[in-house]
Amino acid sequence: MSLEPRTSGTLYLVPTPIGNLSDFTPRAVEVLQDVAYILAEDTRTTGKLARHFGVETPLKAFHQHNEHKSTPGWVQALQTGQSLAVCSDAGTPGISDPAFLLVRACVEANIPVVCLPGPTAFVPALVTSGIPSDRFVFEGFLPHKKGRQKRLALLAEEQRTVVFYESPHRILKLLQELKEHCGGERWLACSREISKLHEQTVRGTADSLIEHFTNHEPKGEFVVVVAGKE
């Protein structure tokens, strides 16, 4: 039985550098040059990246405030044969950034989806933490209010390694909450500025990391890796 040739375009998820522009691959540049549009979390940020690599493909805004409304239109564009690329500000689209809704809609519509390998913050933080990485849970950003404490209480019992994202002005709060739920002796690693000039990973107990960031002002976006409960 022969299959009819596919006439739809392809949705490409294109990881962008989280700090070092040299991490952007030649294949990523080629994809951005070949698609009809680049869907960017922030057109200003992706625009700078595109100009740096000589990409002139039109950019369209695609972020958490418009993805529900705009997804059906982009699916229609793909169905007419146009290929699209999605770029978040930094890292892999869909990892704590927009893309999931569009990917799900494409899968339901039998539109091919291709994710290029590339930068994402939690993988280097996890594998350099010194904490077991063979089994882990990725939590991304915790909710700021509703459900936060309940989630932390559940994760405190998790035997696998747990990975969080956190902002610099909330990192001490998170560490104090982890101490409350997991105990001050639970082993952690906090990585910041990954792939940038001032990249740093601080490892130790919850108590020692609270002391460290009380005495050293937290700067940069953080990946927090928490050892599982023994």
Image (cartoon, rainbow, N blue to C red):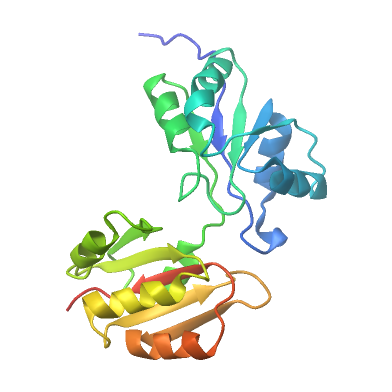
Quadrant for the C terminus, please.
Answer: bottom left
**Can you say whether 136 is above or below 87 in the image?**
below
State whether residue 131 appears in this view.
Answer: no
Nearer to the camera, 112 or 59: 59
Q: Hey, which quadrant is residue 198 in on the image?
A: bottom right
**Can you say whether 44 is above or below 5 in the image?**
below
Which residue is found at the position 54% from the left and 31% from the top?
66
Nearer to the camera, 5 or 194: 194
Q: Hey, which quadrant is residue 154 in on the image?
A: bottom left
Q: How many marks?
A: 0
The percent coordinates of residue 216 (x first, y second) are 55, 87
Which residue is found at the position 58% from the left and 17% from the top?
77
The percent coordinates of residue 20 (x first, y second) are 68, 64
Q: Viewed as shown, does residue 220 lie left or right of 177?
A: right
Q: Viewed as shown, does residue 211 lie left or right of 60?
A: left
Q: Hey, which quadrant is residue 225 in on the image?
A: bottom left
Quadrant for the N terminus, please.
Answer: top left
Which residue is found at the position 62% from the left and 20% from the top?
82
Which residue is found at the position 51% from the left and 70% from the top?
169
State whether residue 94 appears in this view.
Answer: yes
The percent coordinates of residue 99 (x first, y second) are 49, 38
